[in-house]
Image (cartoon, rainbow, N blue to C red):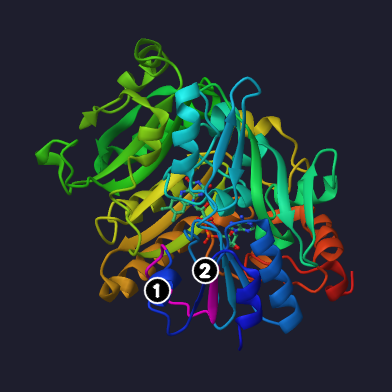
Amino acid sequence: MNYADLKSKLRGALIERGDAQYHEARKLYNGMIDKRPDAIARCVDAADVMACVNHAREQGMTLAVRGGGHNGPGLGSCNDGLVIDLSAMRTVRVDPPARTAYVSGGCVWADVDHATFPFGLAAPSGMISSTGVGGLTLGGGIGHLARQYGLTVDHLKAVDMVLADGSFVSASEREHPDLFWAVRGGGGNFGVVTQFTFDLAPVGMVTAGPIFWATDDAPEVMRRYEEFITDAPRQINGFFAFMVVPPAPMFPQELHLRKVCAVMWCSTAGPEETDRLLAVTGTWPKPLLRRLMPMPLPVLNSLFNELYPPGLQWYWKTDFVDHLSQDAIKAHVRHGSNPATMHSTMHMYPINGAVHDVGESVTPFEHRKAKWAEVIVGVDPDPAKKDTIVSWARDYWDAVHPYAAAGAYVNFMMEEGPARIEATYGTNYSRLRRVKARYDSGNLFRVNQNILPAMAAGH
Ligand SMILES: Cc1cc2nc3c(=O)[nH]c(=O)nc-3n(C[C@H](O)[C@H](O)[C@H](O)COP(=O)(O)OP(=O)(O)OC[C@H]3O[C@@H](n4cnc5c(N)ncnc54)[C@H](O)[C@@H]3O)c2cc1C
């Protein structure tokens, strides 16, 4: 393929096979994924993105769009096609009186945290701030503020996008409302978002940290945790985990590498009020460690960044969960108490509270009435451990899946086939397909959890 014409239209760099930067540029966060695109365009503005979209469509090329590059199955890249890499588009502008942030399409959440924290403001994001704003937002967005402020998409006010025909549009409740509905959960199916506009929440400092318990206490802790989190005050967020304590200085040495169950708390209340709100946990089994402290939200959001640097091997399994029955707890304890490796873990992120305030068809994120988005991740730096982490995650998921609700969070899925995507969007799926047909009938944007255009399937 000759890229001279495309190159002449770009202000950003075009990196081709054989270029010195190619291997570095094609790397994804998940070291298990090894994709080799034909070329990677480091777009610097919407005009660059438009040129790439037009080029890919006209040449009939596979086109991938890369935001933060964190996607589990590597849907920010492709083999043999063109990658629109947005990582050079990382501007954030905050309008404090309007509590609004204008965020370029290639930002990671650390960029947003950095820009909003000085104003005592935050966009609800995810648990690891090296994750891209693009993919996380377009799939829904579940994080430490979910119970109080909802999903990331619940704070999305508008997007600027390049569509499959190369045109540039803004979408909001007022302009292209169908498109704006679709991008709030429907992933990268509808075009390339060059700017996100977020409504910010008044959050600066939080009181946060883990409580660890022995895995022998897990059945009782899981039962008490469900009882509490179902109706807990919304300032309190806490995700349940099975994990191995990392050998980090913030933990006592005697706990290093111990397998534990845990709840990672984040409260928007101050330390004393948080103690009061969490007083009930004093009646739960005696913990091995309780380490909550005041910290800036950006510190909490980056707490795991070092433990999980780019390049580790990752394998994901996921479900939504409504309730933890005794049998489900037994299955969790059997598998969760024995993570495959130090980095492997199971998290249950609560999506009740404010997430439940929004109707199931208001955005494509249909399964809002579930209590948790559960994720089982087999993770390790060593590629030779691939089979070990994959079989641990699969066996664990096979054991707990029978107790799960329908569907799964798209951002925690590997490539699991059309039925799983359809189940995830449930009754919103046919509407998504109609919007897809209107804006991308040729399915140019198909390197994602793909929604087939309605007409292509005869609908
Ligand atoms: C360590 C880790 C922690 C995570 N924690 C959370 C969490 O707490 N909460 C949560 O909700 N999710 C979490 N995730 C999942 C995360 O939301 C998804 O992996 C998401 O796809 C990552 O987005 P990205 O932009 O980094 O990925 P990419 O791989 O760049 O892109 C993912 C998908 O989004 C599309 N896309 C990205 N940017 C754009 C754009 N600007 N316009 C159009 N399409 C775009 C891509 O085409 C691709 O299909 C986590 C993932 C990892 C690896």
Mark 1: give few (<14), some (14-19) or many (20+) Cα within 10 Å: few
Instruction: Point out the tag, 2 or 1, that comes first from the N-terminus.
Output: 2
Q: Which residue is mark 1?
A: 21
Q: Is residue 33 magenta?
A: yes
Above/below status of 344 relative to 382:
above
Left/right of residue 130 with respect to residue 450 in the rendered view = left
Instruction: Name the amino acid, label 2.
Output: Ala
Determine which quarter of the picture holds residue 253: top left
Above/below status of 105 relative to 310:
above
Residue at the image position 42 percent from the left and 34 percent from the top: 223
Quadrant of the image containing the C terminus: bottom right
Q: State the mark number for residue 233.
A: none
Work out how far the residue at label 2 is from the one at label 1, CA to CA, in angstroms: 11 Å
Q: Main secondary structure of the magenta part?
A: loop
Q: Determine if residue 369 is in view.
A: no
Relative image position of residue 341 (x, y in whole percent): 26, 60
Mark 2: give few (<14), some (14-19) or many (20+) Cα within 10 Å: some
Relative image position of residue 440 (x, y in whole percent): 80, 66
In the image, 180 versus 357, the foreground residue is 180
In the image, 407 versus 147, the foreground residue is 147
Instruction: Name the amino acid, label 1.
Output: Gln
Q: State the mark number for residue 13.
A: 2
Quadrant of the image containing the N terminus: bottom right
Q: Is residue 258 magenta?
A: no
* Element under disc 2: loop
Segment tinted magenta in the rendering:
29-41
Determine which quarter of the picture holds residue 273: top left
Q: Determine if residue 112 is in view.
A: yes
